Image (spheres, grey):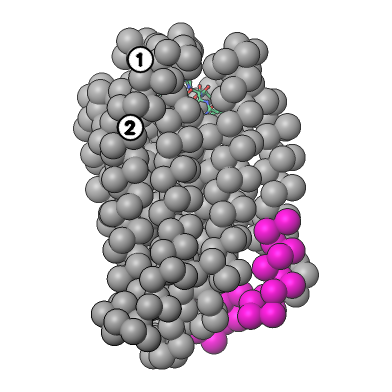
Amino acid sequence: MLYHLLYPLHTTISAFNVFRYITFRTIYAVLTAFIISFFLGPWMIRKLSQMQVGQYVRDDGPQTHLKKAGTPTMGGTLIISAVAAATLLWADLTNFFVWIMMLVLIGFGLIGFIDDYLKQVVKRSKGLSGRGKLILQTIVATIIGILLVTHAEFNTQLTVPFFKYLTRDLGWWYVLFAVLVIVGASNAVNLTDGLDGLAIGPVTIASGAYMIFAYVAGNVKLAEYLQIQYVAGCGEVTIFCGALIGAGLGFLWFNAYPAQVFMGDVGSLSLGGSLGAVAVATKQEIVLVLVGGLFVMEALSVIFQVGYFKMTHGKRIFRMAPLHHHFELKGWPEPKVIVRFWIIAIALALLSMSTLKLR
Ligand code: 57M
């Protein structure tokens, strides 16, 4: 909105030219989202406590988690509000990709919100069923996939990092592929959200990596130079990624160990879905396995654990899945698990950046 209000003034005052630049608007999107989530955080936590939106903690998990019972949850509503406000303030609102991002952020946020609301407020302890959640996620992701595939500036070519000549046109199958990426990312972030700051840290780190990918993919010269697919218009996604970083850092202030608030499904489903949609929109889908490698590790630990558990009628590979519980039960203090997982996330994000050069 500010872009539309302030940039036209450059004809009279040339300094307003600066609002044209994605880099400039991204910096302000980071700051705006940070300020919103940082300053509204305490108010939000008070409100959630008053509404008694306190976390129920399962007694079959690590015992150290029992003391977390009653921690306000659904803090994700603040993250979503901060990301949406900052994006709408600084991005070009005539840009197609900006609205795709709003759709995924709010669509997946609503699914999580309904789930949390049933669990926390209506006290229907289980919330939405796993199947119900998956169906709703698939519907929203399919809409996004169809919108992308039918968009004139978007192609359905799939490229593989490190192998510039390995491409394949998926045609309408791209919709299915996009659904897999978006729904998979959403659920993987949800599984990771089990220790203080464990999800929001790597989400912020991955957003940083995609901020760079989006900028490069949306810039015809840089995309050509680095030999990645150019996606006209996706440069504005850089601003959305910046908003994710700012809101994520502001939320981490309160979610850092010992957490004063959890993000809830409203946060984890929405943030994961958003990362998936960013990966698809920037045509850097496969590299998400690397950028979000930590989420992949957590999800795989669950798949292997559950598979093995069922096959062997009760035997386990890990002491408990997802993976972070395994290390907790091995005796690592919670902050150690969290910081070590962040370190892995940073290393993977840096490694993913090398795909830009190694082609
Ligand atoms: C949600 N939710 C946290 C909080 C957060 C298939 C199965 C592996 C699924 C998995 C599962 O349900 N995962 C998704 C994980 C919960 O956090 C809430 O949920 C929101 C995210 N959706 O925002 O509102 C608890 O996590 C802790 N927490 C923090 N700090 C945070 O910042 O400490 C969360 C955020 C909170 C709090 O304690 O209460 C969760 O873990 O429930 N299920 C599991 O993860 C369960 N694993 C399991 O059953 N493993 C089995 C295999 C055979 C399936 C095994 O390995 O034996 C574990 N989770 C828990 N207890 N809590 C095990 C038992």
Q: Where is residue 218 shown, x and y percent of the image?
A: 47, 78
Q: Which of marks 1 and 2 is nearer the N terminus?
A: 2
Q: Is residue 166 visible?
A: yes
- The residue sitting at the front extreme is 12
Instruction: Left or right? Give the position of 324 relative to 123.
Output: left
The structure residue drawn at horizontal position 48% and vertical position 57%, both measured from the top left corner, is 88
Residue holding disc 1: 68
- Between 124 and 161, the one nearer to me in the picture: 124
Q: What's drawn in magenta, residue-wise?
A: 143-170
The structure residue drawn at horizontal position 61% and vertical position 74%, both measured from the top left corner, is 158
Q: Nearer the viewer's eye, disc 1 or disc 2?
A: 2
- Between 165 and 10, the one nearer to me in the picture: 10
Residue holding disc 2: 41
Residue 145 highlighted magenta (yes or no):
yes
Q: Where is residue 291 shown, x and y percent of the image?
A: 40, 58
- Where, quadrant-wise, is the C terminus in this rendering? bottom left
Within 10 Å of the Cα at label 1, are there few (<14), some (14-19), or many (20+) other Cα atoms? some
Which element carries disc 1, helix, strand or loop? Answer: helix
Specify whether tag 1 is near ligand 1 (CB below 8 Å): yes
Amino acid type at image mark 1? Lys
Evaluate if marks 1 and 2 touch, with contact meaning CB atoms under 8 Å apart: no
Would you place residue 93 above or below residue 180 in this image?
below
